[in-house]
């Protein structure tokens, strides 16, 4: 089982990198122009030739690919076309901030979603409607719009949080919230419906017939069922958070993989693009693994769909 | 502490708006590199705001009569921050490094094409040989792009030198996190301040944090909240507020060079027709745009040179003022007589269409609004301007292959020789970026521009450059928009004396001093 | 004729009193639809009208610039104010409705077609092809969606069409997964076996039973997808890779307007409100339809 | 809250009314129900589905749905006026003084938690603090509920338990605090006869300990074993109530009589269960087919099917099963859950490929390796119409897009019969044949009742004029009175059309009633087979004997059929 899973993970990593590599080769834009600084620089033909040779861009694509893979296995992501420094030096420092941002965003999203669920589900038509509407509203908000609003309100006008930067927890709050609010809408929608479903289950009635209070039933029985589909959604969300973090990173001037990725693609910085894809794929795989483990902790039934013995 | 104490009084946070690629400005050659280089590199010579060249690391120089040989004498008491001593050898190493194809310099092609070689005569004397007269040589040397680095450091692999280049300037690089920040610390042994500096010896501030903050409102927000002490690329929309803010001081200066413009591709229809080009220029209401979206924070440019460039002539400022009637007449003359249902001009069944590949992210928000206004006014004259948003790589690819009709450009440099880079035949071809985006080839212009390099007689040069500006203007090669400007804002409640170095008007932190708290 | 039938009234089975005529049914529909859904539905109708016939609501030319009147606050002459180029924001928001909704629709359609092709194929195919497709979809999931979108833009330039394609491709893996599950469910449903035991051929079952049933919730998916696609596309615009000027696409307007937030909040606010409104109304209506559909199954 | 004294009645309820306010208006579900219960007695509530039994029971624990409106002249529960109890007071009663066993045992325990924790929760909710004490009591309750290895079971989750064990665990969690009143809602439905018998014994034991028991069922045979008093409910009203022997032996209300008649247990083929009049005419025209007249309708030889479980081990779920179904007869297959009945049916239908063995349909090779080569679906297709399936859950066998009419015309179209107009006429005719009113024809099956749906399924199965009908638990989802109608209908159809039935059920009573021949399965094997009369009267294997002994019987002498015969 473990071996199979590990092999599957390596395969996904390899496939993601390979796909990116070849697709990037098909996109227009000469890497040499990227390497030489794009618009504004006027290199000599000798320089261009030197660059081509130095980066091995004069070799057939397949050879470039193979040598890239070879280097990758040894942990060498190559040198950035734009920054001319080893890719690992660029993205290395970005990994942690991005994971912090994505992690905190996910945590916030869960807190908001669970608050919605616990406070509004099954508490009368009015609260239910309010909760439902707010969730859909949240899910309909463009994250960058939320980010700008939060920045203007809480950082510039009220001064409660720093406008930007990446020092400490306080500077993480607003960017994380800007990603978390739309996400919380999605998570809350699925938790709501599964919470509703769980509340309608006979075992809830059983528990109440045992003398449990409404609150106890919600917390000890229904909640556990309700978070299961949200967990699955989270696995997907973290993967996409890492790249969609770019909007928060830009607005709040944070370092991060999202911005590295977008800038790298826009400037055809192939080595950086590949490395970020690699890391995002790895994060996705790891998060999926973690979610699987969590899922099993929450739902110890071996078969998640429930099996009769 | 509170928001007003984001940094200690010995750290200065500077928020810049654009990513820096390699820190070594010899590589690539983009403005953000020059901007930070001005704070840790010294140059061979310096230039004052009047354009006159003064000594700096070179104490003296002489030029041979044919203009082909420059003999520099360098200071004997300057050390790079890695401990290497400045010698004539360093001059050679630097110039050779800039033109070495392996350096991947984007600037060498523009500024050092005439460079041939350097001989080290003695530890303080270097003789530079050029292959043709180049009167602008000293001027370009004064730019931070061509700052002098430690020859020992230059010998390291590029990946290292890009990350931690070594100069002899007032600061040295401590750490660099690409896309995030550069940390610089004071060079305690600094003794080579340029003539334009206000003091000598080590800088006043101990540490600089050079933060990269591309989003305009965030950058300004940092300053307002006190998390940044200064910023560049001051967003025009916040000017009024900043001016009213007693704690903020604005420092503004137009940069020399070719102003912000839209260059017209003369190598293909419809702009291969002079009348169409002229009509397009007459159709644009640039002033109105500058006043509305830039709130008057930039100065209108009229001719091919920005007004702070040497040999600038104001004669061409109003040649192509908005004139719908003239535009209509010119288009009628050019045969674009019919109109289609949407009001665009048509000739032989073809719509008068102008392709304009554009990277919005590379320009300030106001520029994006301005080109949209030009699009709208051009429409009234019958032009359909297609602003084709694209990513940087795609747009520059199109730019290098003349697959456009309009291209947004500017070229900052401290010499009128910029006309040669932007309009001469020499620069219609390039292995990379094509500097002459008009594709204009005119032997008369070429020879005038070369002649202007062959003399250091200011009067002669002035006349030649006037002729050159005349030709460029006559041929309607560019729609000049506004002068590039350095727009720097400083928290004046904490600091004072933030100046601009004179060659490219880049922020210069050496003289900044803390304000005594009351 | 052989019959053991008796009049309906004596068959002792609980009859649902409210499933009678269509008239009653309509009445029930009206009464069982919550007020919120009605409001959302009305707004959606307005949006669709604005998209189909903007001239109904347009009072000014959405593209006409007037630099002298830039940054006018909302007021009598400009209900939503003017933007940095002096254009009337109300007119632009209305003129942009068509493009934005079309973008949402097209992106969702592309995502559904691509995702559907993958998902349904996987669902009805044997183990091997199924797991191959699943792997592929898994890779696409591990692959940042933004990259996918940016690559499409790099290859074919920007614009509303490209944005739709980019967003569509980016959302395809999600749909693939969803539709595969749906297909597996349908394939395992007893009515498929019933069709087989009625002597239907496999291809007939695929065409007439499986695909139509997989497609049943499609309408819901589309309504839910439109809103999300518009939000997604606005993120592309934020990165400067969305619609081309002077198009009145909401995302692009919002992205432009963010620069002027402190002096002219309305430039960004109104397109932002409309994006949220479009997403909100389509989602609310979609969810309602989904619940109704689920109630039926 | 004062404890209840043993002399008082546990329940005293006069004119209980419960109504629900819904989007469609207010519906009255329980009307003027009066009940009384003394300690040590069992009161049975019987009645068809939807008659308000569960709603009544939930009212007694104060757990009605939020949209319920309860009113009563008197509503005394354990000596308290239930109408005035606060939620907090109710909580103290629930679990501790009233144990409530929900209707659906399979889903009434939290599937994510162990059974032990579920029971433990009741103890904790009522302030039993000592960890060890609680543990001991959990085990004791499980043991009392007839679970032999409580230490193991307490650590399992409900998903890991069989239906019978789950039902016991559910009873254990309701009785762990020794409540005076136990309410058990359909505690034996969906259980095999053997398990059912054990549960009934368990409930009887509770009664003997002096508890009051309210016991809900729609199965009179079950009720007759346990109840002291019976209240028969119909449409929310108690139409008849009284001492058990009296209600069963001398029913006064028409509806009670119908219910009693509907019980199939112990009554062989040919007896009628419902009051539907029998109208048999001569058989319709028989469709020409490749069937040989002499060959048995179905013939299965040595069927074997094994499944590989996720852990890699292989489990044989059908093991060497052979049978013959003569034309025009009914072969009943009976066996406990998981014994391989459905799998056998699927093999016979050609939906599941057997590992070994063959099936012939009307003498024709149908499945498996016949004459050296496997029968393929392509070979079966022309004869598919000869064998049709009616299964337990008819709704899932209808394409959800189809109306009742489409369901039938689609089947007709599959058989290639007629023009669209003709098919519509034939559909109407078929619906008439199964006793459905024509005005149902445009409805979605979803809006039909269970019995109506089952009739539509039968009509569809008949549409192609098949020779063999495969009936997999066709009535186990229906309540007795509707079950009776469907069974009678099937009997009539067999008589009319000479159909052959393969009838699968876990309900011995039903099997006894419908079958000519019977096959008893256990763990994939055929334990015993033979004619229905011999097998039910003279079972040979111990297994069958045990099964039969467990079937609750109506008191034979008092059966209503006898009274009306
Ligand atoms: N919360 C509710 N809202 C509306 N109607 C309800 C509600 N709960 C129950 N009913 C209706 O009340 C009626 C009686 O339901 P109840 O569950 O008591 O029947 P039952 O006799 O227990 O049937 P079964 O044998 O199927 O369990 C049914 O018609 C049901 O639809
Ligand atoms: N597709 C399958 N894969 C694995 N095991 C299966 C499969 N189908 C059935 N089984 C197993 O085969 C055994 C027999 O199942 P089957 O459905 O035939 O029993 P049954 O007698 O019809 O039971 P019930 O009365 O519960 O319907 C069960 O243990 C079941 O779990
Ligand atoms: Mg019930
Ligand atoms: Mg079965």
Image (cartoon, grey):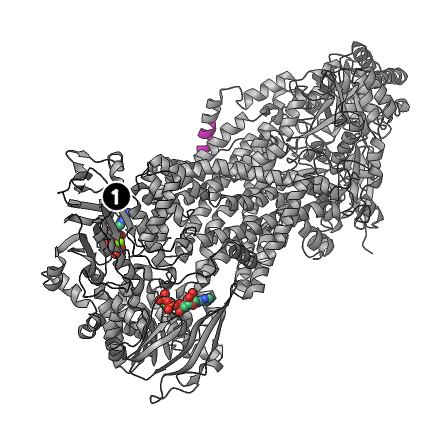
The chain to which mark 1 is attached is: D
Quarter of the render that holds ligand 3: bottom left
| Numbered disc 1: secondary structure | loop
Q: Residue at x 83, y 41 (%)?
A: C69
Looking at the picture, does residue D7 appear above or below residue B250? below
Question: In this image, C173 relative to B409: left or right?
Answer: left
Q: How many marks?
A: 1
- Residue A68 in magenta? yes
Q: Is mark 1 within 8 Å of ligand 2?
A: yes
Q: Which quarter of the image is occupied by the C terminus of chain A? A: bottom left
Q: Nearer the viewer, residue A97 or A62?
A: A62
Question: In this image, A178 relative to D253: left or right?
Answer: right
Q: Nearer the viewer, residue B227 or D466?
A: D466
- Residue D375 in magenta? no
Which of the 4 image quarters holds residue D255? bottom left
Q: How dense is the environment of label 1, judged by Cα within 10 Å: few (below 14), some, or many (20 and up)?
A: some
Instruction: Give residue B192's position: percent from left, percent from top.
Output: 76, 33
Instruction: Give residue D327's position: percent from left, percent from top.
Output: 17, 47
Q: Residue at x 24, y 41 (%)?
A: D287
Looking at the picture, does residue B410 appear above or below residue A175? above
Q: Which quarter of the image is occupied by the N terminus of chain A? A: top left
Which residues are the magenta region?
A67-84
Which residue lies under the disc numbered 1?
D352
- The answer to whether residue B215 is seen in the rendering is no
Question: In this image, B511 relative to C275: left or right?
Answer: right
Instruction: Give residue B65's position: percent from left, percent from top.
Output: 82, 12
């Amino acid at each position: 089982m473990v071996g199979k899973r590990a092999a599957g993970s390596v395969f996904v990593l390899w496939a993601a990198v390979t796909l990116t590599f070849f697709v990037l080769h098909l996109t227009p834009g000469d890497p040499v122009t990227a390497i030489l600084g794009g618009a504004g620089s006027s290199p000599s033909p000798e320089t261009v030739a030197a660059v081509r040779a130095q980066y091995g861009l004069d070799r057939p694509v397949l050879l470039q690919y193979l040598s890239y893979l070879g280097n990758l296995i040894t942990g060498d992501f190559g040198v950035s076309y734009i920054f001319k420094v080893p890719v690992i030096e660029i993205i290395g420092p970005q990994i942690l901030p991005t994971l912090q941002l994505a992690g905190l965003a996910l945590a916030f999203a869960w807190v908001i979603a669970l608050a919605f669920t616990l406070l509004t589900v099954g508490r009368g038509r009015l609260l239910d409607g309010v909760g439902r509407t707010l969730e859909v509203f949240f899910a309909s908000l463009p994250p960058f719009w939320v980010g700008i609003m939060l920045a203007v309100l809480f950082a510039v006008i009220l001064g409660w949080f720093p406008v930007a930067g990446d020092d400490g927890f306080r500077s993480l709050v607003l960017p994380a919230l800007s990603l978390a609010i739309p996400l919380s809408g999605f998570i809350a929608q699925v938790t709501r419906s599964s919470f509703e479903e769980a509340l309608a289950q006979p075992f809830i009635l059983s528990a109440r017939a045992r003398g449990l209070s409404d609150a106890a039933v919600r917390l000890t029985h229904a909640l556990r069922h309700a978070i299961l589909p949200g967990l699955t959604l989270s696995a997907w969300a973290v993967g996409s958070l890492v790249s969609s973090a770019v909007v928060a990173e830009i607005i709040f001037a944070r370092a991060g993989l999202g911005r590295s990725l977008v800038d790298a693609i826009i400037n055809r910085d192939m080595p950086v693009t590949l490395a970020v894809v690699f890391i995002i794929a790895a994060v996705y795989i790891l998060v999926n693994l973690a979610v699987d483990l969590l899922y099993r902790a929450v739902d110890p039934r071996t078969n998640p769909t429930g099996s009769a013995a | 502490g509170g928001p007003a104490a984001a940094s200690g009084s010995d750290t200065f946070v500077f928020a810049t708006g654009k990513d820096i690629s390699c820190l070594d400005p010899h590589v690539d050659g983009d403005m953000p590199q020059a901007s930070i280089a001005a704070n840790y590199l010294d140059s061979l010579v310096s230039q004052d705001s009047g354009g006159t060249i003064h000594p700096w690391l070179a104490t003296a120089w002489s030029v041979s009569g044919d203009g082909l040989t420059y003999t520099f004498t360098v200071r004997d008491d300057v050390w790079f921050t890695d401990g290497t001593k400045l010698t004539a050898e360093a001059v050679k190493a630097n110039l050779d490094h800039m033109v070495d194809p392996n350096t991947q310099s984007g600037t060498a092609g523009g500024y050092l094409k005439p460079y041939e070689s350097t001989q080290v005569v003695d530890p303080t004397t270097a003789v530079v040989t050029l292959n043709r007269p180049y009167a602008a040589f000293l001027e370009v040397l004064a730019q931070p792009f061509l700052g002098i680095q430690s020859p020992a450091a230059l010998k390291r692999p590029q990946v290292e030198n890009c990350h931690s280049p070594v100069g002899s300037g007032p600061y040295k690089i401590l750490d660099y996190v690409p896309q995030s920040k550069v940390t610089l610390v004071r060079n305690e042994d600094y003794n080579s301040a340029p003539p334009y500096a206000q003091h000598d010896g080590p800088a006043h501030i101990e540490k600089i944090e050079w933060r990269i903050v591309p989003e305009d409102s965030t950058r300004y927000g940092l300053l307002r909240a006190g998390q940044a002490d200064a910023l560049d690329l001051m967003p025009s929309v916040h000017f009024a507020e900043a001016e009213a803010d007693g704690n903020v001081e604005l420092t503004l200066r137009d940069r020399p060079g070719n102003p912000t413009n839209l260059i017209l591709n003369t190598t293909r229809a419809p702009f291969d027709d002079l009348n169409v080009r002229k009509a397009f220029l007459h159709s644009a209401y640039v002033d109105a745009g500058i006043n509305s979206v830039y709130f008057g924070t930039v100065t209108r440019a009229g001719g091919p040179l920005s007004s702070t460039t040497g040999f600038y002539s104001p004669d061409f400022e109003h040649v192509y003022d908005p004139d719908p009637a003239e535009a209509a007449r010119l288009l009628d003359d050019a045969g674009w007589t019919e109109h289609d249902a949407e009001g665009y001009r048509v000739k032989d069944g073809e719509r008068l269409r102008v392709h304009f590949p554009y990277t919005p992210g590379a320009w300030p928000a106001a520029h994006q609004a301005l080109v949209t206004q030009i699009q709208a006014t051009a429409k009234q004259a019958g032009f359909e301007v297609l602003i084709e948003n694209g990513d940087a790589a795609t747009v520059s690819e199109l730019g290098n292959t003349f697959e456009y009709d309009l291209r947004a450009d500017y070229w900052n440099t401290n010499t009128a020789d910029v006309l040669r880079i932007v309009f001469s035949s020499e620069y219609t071809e390039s292995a990379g970026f094509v500097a002459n985006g008009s594709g204009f080839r005119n032997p008369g212009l070429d020879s005038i521009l070369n002649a202007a390099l062959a003399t250091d007689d200011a009067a002669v040069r002035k006349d030649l450059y006037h002729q050159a500006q005349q030709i460029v203007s006559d041929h309607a090669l560019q729609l000049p928009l506004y002068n590039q400007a350095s727009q720097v804002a400083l928290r004046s409640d904490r600091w004072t004396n933030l100046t601009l170095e004179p060659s490219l008007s880049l922020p210069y932190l050496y003289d900044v001093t803390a304000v005594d708290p009351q | 004729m052989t019959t053991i039938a008796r009049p309906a009234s004596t068959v002792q089975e609980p009859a649902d009193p409210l499933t009678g005529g269509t008239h009653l049914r309509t009445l029930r529909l009206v009464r069982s639809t919550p007020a919120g859904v009605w409001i959302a539905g009305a707004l959606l109708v307005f949006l669709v009208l604005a998209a189909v016939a903007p001239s109904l609501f347009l009072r000014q030319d959405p593209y006409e610039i007037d630099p002298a009147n830039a940054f006018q606050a909302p007021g009598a002459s400009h209900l939503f104010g003017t933007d940095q180029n002096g254009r009337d924001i109300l007119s632009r928001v209305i003129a942009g409705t068509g493009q934005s909704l079309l973008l949402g629709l097209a992106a969702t359609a592309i995502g559904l077609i691509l995702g559907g092709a993958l998902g349904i194929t996987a669902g009805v195919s044997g183990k091997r092809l199924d797991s191959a497709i699943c792997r592929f979809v898994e890779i696409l999931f591990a692959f940042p969606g933004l990259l996918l979108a940016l690559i499409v833009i790099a290859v074919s330039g920007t614009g509303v069409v490209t944005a739709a394609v980019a967003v569509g491709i980016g959302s395809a893996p999600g749909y693939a997964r969803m539709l595969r599950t749906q297909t597996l469910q349908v394939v395992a449903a007893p009515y498929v076996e019933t069709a087989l035991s009625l002597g239907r051929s496999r291809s007939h079952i695929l065409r007439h039973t499986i695909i139509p049933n997989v497609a049943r919730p499609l309408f819901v998916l589309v309504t839910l997808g439109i809103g999300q696609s518009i939000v997604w596309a606005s993120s592309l615009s934020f990165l400067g890779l969305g619609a081309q000027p002077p198009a009145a696409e909401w995302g692009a307007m919002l992205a432009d307007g963010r620069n002027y937030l402190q002096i002219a909040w309305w430039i960004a606010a109104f397109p932002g409100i409309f994006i949220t409104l479009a997403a909100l109304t389509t989602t609310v209506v979609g969810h309602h339809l989904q619940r109704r559909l689920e109630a039926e199954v | 809250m004062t404890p209840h004294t043993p002399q008082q009645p546990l329940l005293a309820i006069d004119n209980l009314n419960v109504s629900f306010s819904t989007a469609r208006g207010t519906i009255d579900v329980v009307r003027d129900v009066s009940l009384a219960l003394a300690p040590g007695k069992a009161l049975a509530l019987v009645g068809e589905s939807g008659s308000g039994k569960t709603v009544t029971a939930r009212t007694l624990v104060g757990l009605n749905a939020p949209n319920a409106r309860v009113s009563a002249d008197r509503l005394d529960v354990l000596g308290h006026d239930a109408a005035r109890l606060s939620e907090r007071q109710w909580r103290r009663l629930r679990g501790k003084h009233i144990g409530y066993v929900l209707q659906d045992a399979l889903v009434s325990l939290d599937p994510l938690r162990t059974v032990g924790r579920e029971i433990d929760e009741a103890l904790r909710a009522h302030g039993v603090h000592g960890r060890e004490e609680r543990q001991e009591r959990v085990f004791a309750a499980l043991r009392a509920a007839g679970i032999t290895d409580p230490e193991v079971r307490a650590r399992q989750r409900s998903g890991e338990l069989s239906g019978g064990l789950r039902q016991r665990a559910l009873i254990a969690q309701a009785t762990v605090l020794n409540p005076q009143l136990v309410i058990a809602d359909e505690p034996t439905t969906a259980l095999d006869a053997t398990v059912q018998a054990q549960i009934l014994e368990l409930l009887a034991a509770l009664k003997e300990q002096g508890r009051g028991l309210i016991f809900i069922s729609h199965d009179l045979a079950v009720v007759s074993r346990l109840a002291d008093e019976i209240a028969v409910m119909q449409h929310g009203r108690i139409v008849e109530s009284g001492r058990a022997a009296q209600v069963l032996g001398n029913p006064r209300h028409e509806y009670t009589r119908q219910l009693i008649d509907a019980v199939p247990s112990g009554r062989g083929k040919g007896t009628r269960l419902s009051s539907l009049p029998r109208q048999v005419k001569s058989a319709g025209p028989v469709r020409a087919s490749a069937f040989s007249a002499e060959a048995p309708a179905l013939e299965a030889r040595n069927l074997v099917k094994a499944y590989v479980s996720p852990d890699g081990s292989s489990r044989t779920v059908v093991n060497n099963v052979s049978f013959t179904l003569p034309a025009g007869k009914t072969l009943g297959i009976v066996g406990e859950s998981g014994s391989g009945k459905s799998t056998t049916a699927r093999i016979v239908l050609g939906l599941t490929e057997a590992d070994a063995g063959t099936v012939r349909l009307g003498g024709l090779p149908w499945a498996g390796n016949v004459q050296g080569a496997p029968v393929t679906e392509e070979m079966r297709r022309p004869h598919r119409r000869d064998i049709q399936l009616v299964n337990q859950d008819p709704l899932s066998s209808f394409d959800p897009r189809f109306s009742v009419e489409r369901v039938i015309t689609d089947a007709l179209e599959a058989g290639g019969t007629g023009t669209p107009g003709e098919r519509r006429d034939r559909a109407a005719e078929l619906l008439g044949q199964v006793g459905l009113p024509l005005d149902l024809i445009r409805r979605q099956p979803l809006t039909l009742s269970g019995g109506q749906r089952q009739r539509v399924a039968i009509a569809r199965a008949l549409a192609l004029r098949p020779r063999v009908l495969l009936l997999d638990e066709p009535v186990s989802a229906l309540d007795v009175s509707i079950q009776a109608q469907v069974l009678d209908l099937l009997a009539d159809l067999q008589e009319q059309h000479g159909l052959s039935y393969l009838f699968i059920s876990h309900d011995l009573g039903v099997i006894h009633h419908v079958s000519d021949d019977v096959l008893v399965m256990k763990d994939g094997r055929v334990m015993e087979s033979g004619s229905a009369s011999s097998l039910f009267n003279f079972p040979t294997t111990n297994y069958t004997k045990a099964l039969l002994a467990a079937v609750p019987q109506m008191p034979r002498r008092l059966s209503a059929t006898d009274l009306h015969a």
